[in-house]
Image (cartoon, grey):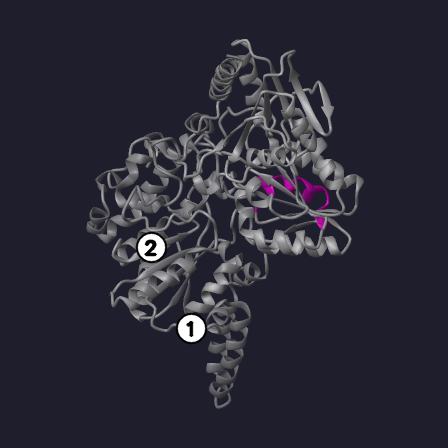
Amino acid sequence: MDRADASKPGEILATISSLAEYKKLPVEALPALAEEIRDFLVDRVSRTGGHIGPNLGVVEVTMALHRVFDSPHDRIVFDTGHQSYVHKILTGRAEGFDRLRKRGGLTGYPNQSESRHDLVENCHASTALSYADGIAKAHVVRGEDRHVVAVVGDGALTGGMCWEALNNIASRKDLPLVIVVNDNGRSYAPTIGGLANHLATLRLNPTYEKLLDTVKETLGRTPVVGPPLFEAMHAVKRGIKDAVAPQAMFEDLGLKYVGPVDGHDLDTMISALERAKGFGGPVIVHTITRKGNGYAPAEDEPDDRMHQSNAFDPDTGQALPGGGGVKWTSVFAEELVAVADERTDVVGITAAMAKSTGISKLADKHPERVFDVGIAEQHAATSAAGLALGGMHPVVAVYSTFLNRAFDQVLLDVGMHRLPVTFVLDRSGITGPDGPSHYGIWDMAVFRVVPGMRIAAPRDAATLREEFREAIAVDDGPTIVRIPTGAVGADLTALERVGGVDVLARDGAQDVLLVGCGSMVTVAMEAAARIREHGFGVTVADPRWVAPVPEALADMASAHRLVVTVEDGVRTGGFGDALAKAMRDAGVTTPLKDLGVSAGWHPHGSRDELMADLGLTAQDVARVATEALVRLDGSDAALRV
């Protein structure tokens, strides 16, 4: 299809409003449909942003799955779920791509509320095999004749959960479970680790079969000695093949192996899946794919093959203008490099996300001091502990939501040993279009309980640089620096610093103390202006370090009639909870209103939309504070009477 015509679905794609209609298509129509799907994906995702590279790579794989298996009777699980766009199209949701990752539109991951074909809303990597193991066992116990398919990106295989699951799956020879390893050599960026290298060896050694064919042909023509010698050579071949191909690795676990299969050859994929389906036990189908396949800008993008993109020009793949300004991640990356230039003990660790967390900037300048561990956050935390024991100061940069997976390691391996490890949590707070699995709203509540943990929440670029350096200077325990996504606003200069707390505004009357955490200081400042319009005096404070709670805040609270905290983390166990406890311990009786993210799984949408839904806009904060002060005035008047 011509790119100019891609705004409308192709002739074949336009006929597919359900999976049943796709299954009715003649086989000879499928290659053309694959091209239409690629054009459709580029056109739609170029408008909304999303995971374009991974989905271009699984077009034929997904089409083959839905020809061989009968969803939802047969259960299909994606790992991770961002490679499910083609699945959504084939199950009748093409029209929803106009609002992909937008409020009220399709999510970027499988979603049970969208379709009965979406079973697991898995948005974190390395989980599908455990889901599939349990689902398949349930089918066996219930006597149900159903298959389970787990589509696992090779990057997900760098996560330990995959291997725990494989170990259990291999012990059950009766599980009707097909594992499709989507091997494109990449998770986000190129896949890291020994397993990745093992799989890559096959892709990088295409000549060994040709060599053995030549040997066979030559020896077969040699009289008497030839055939017996070839049999001996064939044994050598098996050894060579075991050394360079992954089947030995999987078969040693007791799993049947099929492959490698060209993941862009529909006929071959369908044949391989049919054989796997008929085996009757767990089978690995190893497919070789190309991330970004069929779209030159993605194929030629060296960093991550357009893994996840904002809106872009579909002809060039270049990002469209918009969303300008310096990003929080960029500020951190620059400061990290500056600190590393000054301190040779500073090293960086990331979990397959070097570019998106800023660690890549350090890798560019000091490659020997950066360690990308793959999608293995637990290992990242304990490896950081080892680096600290070895005399280094590791900086572990991950998304806030992903550090949840390593709580035990942060608690016991790092915290209990009082090791100087700094975790920089990107995408903290409400992040928007990726939905609830990616919101960084738990970190302040979850990691506050680690004894000795210090958590910084910068409000702007200047305080990010300052607080990151303060974190690096800590040598007797772990630290966290949490930063949101998007552009950094203007620096907010403090009037003074009292006991480590920045005071940004203060009026004559001390009616309400507004305490903003991190980027929510900006909201607190805007709310303060609204509160003043009602005749109340406002003090705005930034604790800078939200754990432990600065003692000075309790003193400030005692001098005010009301305290209001504003944070973009969960309320339960959050900063407001912690300040209320600190005030009780100090004997401060000033009433406190804690505003934060309410309990629940909040849907995807823009950050502004979500903040309005959660009651965390400046207008909301001002209304809560003003109404509380009016009630206090009424109580005071009643007491005076």
Looking at the image, residue 545 sits to the left or right of residue 257; the answer is: right
User: Which kind of residue does numbered mark 1 sit on?
Assistant: Ser
Magenta stretch: includes residue 306: no
Question: Could you classify mark 1 by the number of other residues whose Cα lies within 10 Å: few (under 14), some (14-19), or many (20 or more)?
Answer: few
Q: Dot 1: what SS?
A: loop
Give the labeled residue for mark 1.
Answer: 171
Magenta stretch: includes residue 367: yes
Residue at screen point 46% across, 50% down: 290
Quadrant hosting residue 99:
top left
In the image, residue 635 sits, relative to residue 217, either above or below, namely above
User: Main SS type for the magenta part?
Assistant: helix
Q: Position of residue 322 (x, y in %)?
A: 51, 24
Looking at the image, which is closer to me, 201 or 520?
A: 520
In the image, residue 206 sits, relative to residue 396, either above or below, namely below
Q: Which quadrant of the figure contains the N terminus?
A: top left
Residue 179 is tagged as none
> Gap in Å between the C-alphas at discs 1 and 2?
21 Å
* Magenta segment boundaries in residue numbering: 353-369
Looking at the image, which is closer to me, 108 or 446?
A: 446
Q: Position of residue 215 (x, y in %)?
A: 51, 76
Q: Dot 2: what SS?
A: strand
Looking at the image, which is closer to me, 111 or 326?
A: 111
Residue 76 is tagged as 2
Residue at screen point 55% across, 37% down: 574
Q: Of label 1 and label 2, which has the lower sequence position?
A: 2
